[in-house]
């Protein structure tokens, strides 16, 4: 049984190497009861040093190049050539199925997790989840209770792109546990118990992944909504832009001093209200209140660093308002303040592409310094690409007067976003969330697929839309 587990361990390690891009530099295999480890790039000093030290060789031995040199963990240097090193170890010399030595190797081979940020803007745990908690050191502990007869248990989830071997759990008297550096956000996860994927039996919060599978869900919150008092109140709901107001309000939990709800919110600015036994109220503890387009007062919460909007060419005006797609083009909410012969306002936004304009003394005004615009004539808006991560480039067409781009990322706006003329062609930088995006360039009103992009799909008109995938 032990030999079988060791062979399984080495097979799992081989999968781990391959899944992390290490299959060319390092390989493991079993032959005649001997484990072989090959380092296929002996010139990679960092890799060689890390692997040999983790296999028990002293640093003084690392570059001796001595064949048959044996380490304190019983690894032997079987061969050492110009471009490769091969180590061997009898399976009988391993101490367990996933021992400390193997764990060290996983870390050495850079398979330690790089945790992915959540892509969702809002979430909360509908019920208390006591077996997942944040520790005093900032790490989050996941526990799987029971399964004490199991041999190997791993945690996998969206936060490590569903890798299967990056998070081995440690057995304790009550079950299994692992501590990870979990970002704030909405996360889906599962446990892998002796090769079998299972949802968390102690967490009823699940969701379908659209591929016929069900995953457990855990939210690490970054903000707590609190409403003091109201001891005799029966129910308090949180309604906000992120809950689609009263379409999906979140139920708050009663405490000894009032009501509260821990939530995750992505960076941005959010209007919200409480519904107290059916009555809508603003947050009495929050002084930031603004009127919406219908004249209703809402409380406002900002998460993240603000963006400074500054208009300097209208210093003689009396009243300036910022409005845009980020606040549903509200014409009275974001009144700007005059500072240093310019109008300024700070507003928190999450990464994305936003259209905006100013209202100066009652008239809509397009600033002169827009690098990107959308629309035409009186419908022209300025476009802010916050934290751009994708560059679209169209080579040539140097005699064109106007080059734009339109696609699913801007709802196929016609005319689309303007490209800037650069050396050898045209260019625009935008922010795109992970996903698939069809698009076309519009050159002097002529729609054309991206000539440098071989990926395309046929659209409903029989033409071609170019396709770009991001983060998948």
Image (cartoon, rainbow, N blue to C red):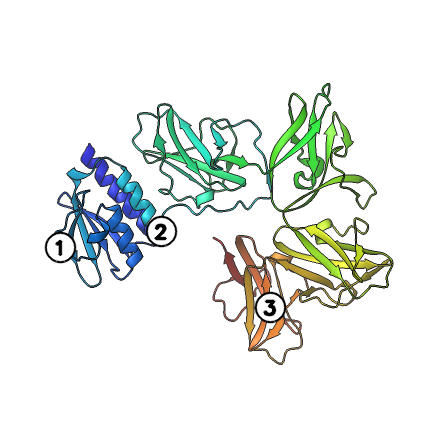
Res 39 → quadrant = bottom left
State which tag comes first along the sequence, 1 or 3.
1
Q: What kind of element bears circle 1?
A: loop
Q: Is residue 2 above or below residue 254?
A: below
In this rendered view, identify the residue nearer to me: 187 or 104: 104
Q: Whole-percent x and y of residue 87? A: 18, 51
Q: Residue furthest bottom?
A: 399
Q: Whole-percent x and y of residue 396? A: 56, 77
In this rendered view, identify the residue nearer to me: 257 or 422: 257
Q: Is residue 285 left or right of residue 143?
A: right
Q: CA distance from mark 3 to mark 2?
A: 36 Å
Q: Which residue is mark 2?
A: 20
Residue at 51%, 39% in the rendered image: 187
Q: Which residue is mark 3?
A: 441
Q: Whole-percent x and y of residue 217? A: 51, 35
Q: What kind of element bears circle 3?
A: strand
Q: What kind of element bears circle 2?
A: loop
The label nearer to you, 2 versus 1, is: 1
Q: CA distance from mark 1 to mark 3?
A: 61 Å
Q: Which residue is mark 1?
A: 67
Q: CA distance from mark 2 to mark 1?
A: 29 Å
Q: Quadrant of the N terminus?
A: top left
The label nearer to you, 1 versus 3, is: 1
The label nearer to you, 3 versus 2, is: 2
State which tag comes first along the sequence, 2 or 1.
2
């Amino acid at each position: 049984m032990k030999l079988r587990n060791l062979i399984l361990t080495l097979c799992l390690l081989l999968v781990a190497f391959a899944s992390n891009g290490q299959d060319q530099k390092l390989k493991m295999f079993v032959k005649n009861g001997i484990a072989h480890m090959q380092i296929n790039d002996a010139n990679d000093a960092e890799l060689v040093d890390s692997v040999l030290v983790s296999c028990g060789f002293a640093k003084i031995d690392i570059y001796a190049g001595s064949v048959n040199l044996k380490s304190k963990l019983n690894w032997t240097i079987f061969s050492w050539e110009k471009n490769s090193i091969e180590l061997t170890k009898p399976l009988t010399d391993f101490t367990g199925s996933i021992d400390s030595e193997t764990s060290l190797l996983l870390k050495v081979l850079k398979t330690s997790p790089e945790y992915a940020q959540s892509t969702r803007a809002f979430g909360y745990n509908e019920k208390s989840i006591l077996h997942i908690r944040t520790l005093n050191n900032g790490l989050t502990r996941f526990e799987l209770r029971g399964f004490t007869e199991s041999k190997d248990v791993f945690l996998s989830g969206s936060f490590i792109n569903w890798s299967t071997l990056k998070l081995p759990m440690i057995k304790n008297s009550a079950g299994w546990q692992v501590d990870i550096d979990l970002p704030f956000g909405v996360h889906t996860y599962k446990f892998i118990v002796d090769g079998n994927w299972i949802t968390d039996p102690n967490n009823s919060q699940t969701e379908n992944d659209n591929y016929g599978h069900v995953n457990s869900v855990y939210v690490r919150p970054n903000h707590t909504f609190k409403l003091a008092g109201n001891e005799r109140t029966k129910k308090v709901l949180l309604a906000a832009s992120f809950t689609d107001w009263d379409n999906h309000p979140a139920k708050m939990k009663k405490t000894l001093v009032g009501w509260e709800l821990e939530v995750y919110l992505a960076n941005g600015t959010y209007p919200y209200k409480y519904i107290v036994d059916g009555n809508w109220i603003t947050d009495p503890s929050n002084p930031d209140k603004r009127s919406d387009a219908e004249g209703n007062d809402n409380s406002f919460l900002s998460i993240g660093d603000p963006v400074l909007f500054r208009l300097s060419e209208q210093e003689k005006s009396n009243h300036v308002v910022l409005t845009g797609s980020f606040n549903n083009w509200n014409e009275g909410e974001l009144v700007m303040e005059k500072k240093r012969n310019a109008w300024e306002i700070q507003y928190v936004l999450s990464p994305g592409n936003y259209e905006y304009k100013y209202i100066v003394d009652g008239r809509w005004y397009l600033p002169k310094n827009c690098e990107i615009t959308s629309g035409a004539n009186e419908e022209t808006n300025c476009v802010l690409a916050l934290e751009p991560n994708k560059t679209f480039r169209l080579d040539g067409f140097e005699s064109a007067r106007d080059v734009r781009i339109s696609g699913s990322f801007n709802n196929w706006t016609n005319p689309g976003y303007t490209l800037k003329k650069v050396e050898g062609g045209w260019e625009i930088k935008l922010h795109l969330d992970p996903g698939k995006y069809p698009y076309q360039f519009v050159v002097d009103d002529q729609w054309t697929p991206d000539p440098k992009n071989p990926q395309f799909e046929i659209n409903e008109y029989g033409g071609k839309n170019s396709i770009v995938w991001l983060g998948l």
